[in-house]
Image (cartoon, helix red, strand yellow):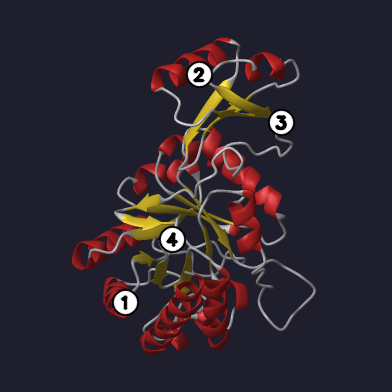
Amino acid sequence: MIVILKQNPQQAQVDRLVAWLNEQGYGTNVSVGKQETIIGLIGDMSNVDMDLIRSLEVVDDVKRISEPYKNANRKFHTDDSVIDAGGVKIGGGHFQVIAGPCSVESREQVKEIAKCVKAAGATLLRGGAFTPRTSPYSFQGLREEGINILLEAKAETGLPIVTEIMDASHLPLFADVDVIQVGARNMQNFELLRALGEAGKPILLKRGLANTLQELLMSAEYIMASGNPNVILCERGIRTFETATRNTLDLSAVPVLHRLSHLPVIVDPSHATGESWLVKPTSVASAAIGADGIMLEVHNDPPHALCDGAQALTCEAFFDVMGAVTAVRSAVFSAEE
């Protein structure tokens, strides 16, 4: 349920209303937008006296919300959320590019790639310290050493770092990580999501390979309901009957999620397609459809990568993709203005 306040309410009126609603046993989420102030009510709404609330002087209207996700719902928060990721803003018109290797393999590899992607215009560095693999015999990442290598690359380049967490017990290792990524396999690891809600850091939440958009938003709700509003949604392709690509990139998810939620939405063309030659056209399409950013895999030697070399871009190819994405965004969004 949302309570829409009259224009330009006095702060004292808002505070009194929030205090009264809390006394009635409802959680509250106050969103101050450009046009209106909205108070979202969280809890059991079965006995709410809508007419009583509507009769209050500061209240303009009261509406029931049927969607089960409240904190992530755009009806609760009409303006786009802007997430501060280590000093880099994502969402609300701020488009960012996250780039780097699938796995941290060595200090020299990461630093070389970090310098390349920064020179091409990337604004955050990605790299897997913990690397989830289907086979237990595949390379699983350097773990704590991998995080330390990423932090060294950050110190040299200034790029905030993004890396994936596998288990809540690893959280102490992520104290200096700027954005914690939740991979597709962990999208519904609800205990992990609760722990990340208490961590307070920006969370990049990937859609599961067989999950609906509502399920993705409900996973975001777990994080937000635990106290962390800093969630970035990521479309990384879903599993369908098609075998020509690694997954099927659902670009329609971007405008749908923007309609349903105020959270930033980025796209991962590398994992979606599984082929480096498909990354450029899908990156361009992601930018054109209104994504708040893209996340790309870049490797200095893809044929010898320890993980997902087939979908990794060379540094030269990454420069080419960045040029195309910049040109398309300039053409599309300048035309809209």
Q: Is residue 147 visible?
A: yes
Q: Is residue 188 visible?
A: no
Counting residues from the start of the chain, the first of labels 4 and 3 encountered is 3
Instruction: Give the x, y percent position of residue 276.
Output: 53, 85
Q: Secondary structure at mark 2?
A: helix
Q: Nearer the viewer, mark 3 or mark 1?
A: 3
Instruction: Give the x, y percent position of residue 149.
Output: 28, 63
Q: Secondary structure at mark 1?
A: helix
The residue that disc 4 covers is: 93
Counting residues from the start of the chain, the first of labels 2 and 1 encountered is 2
For image coordinates 61% across by 72% down, the residue present is 272
**Residues at marks 4 and 3 touching, judged by CB atoms closer than 8 Å:** no
Residue 62's mark? none
Of residues 235 and 186, the one drawn nearer to the viewer in this rendering: 235
Q: Amino acid at mark 4?
A: Gly
> Mark 2 to mark 1: distance in Å?
53 Å
Residue 109's mark? 1
Q: Circle 2: is it few (<14), some (14-19), or many (20+) Cα within 10 Å?
A: many
The residue that disc 3 covers is: 64
Q: Circle 3: is it few (<14), some (14-19), or many (20+) Cα within 10 Å?
A: few
> Mark 4 to mark 3: distance in Å?
29 Å
> Mark 3 to mark 2: distance in Å?
17 Å
Instruction: Give the x, y percent position of residue 263.
Output: 52, 50
> Mark 4 to mark 1: distance in Å?
32 Å
Counting residues from the start of the chain, the first of labels 2 and 4 encountered is 2
For image coordinates 61% across by 41% down, the residue present is 75
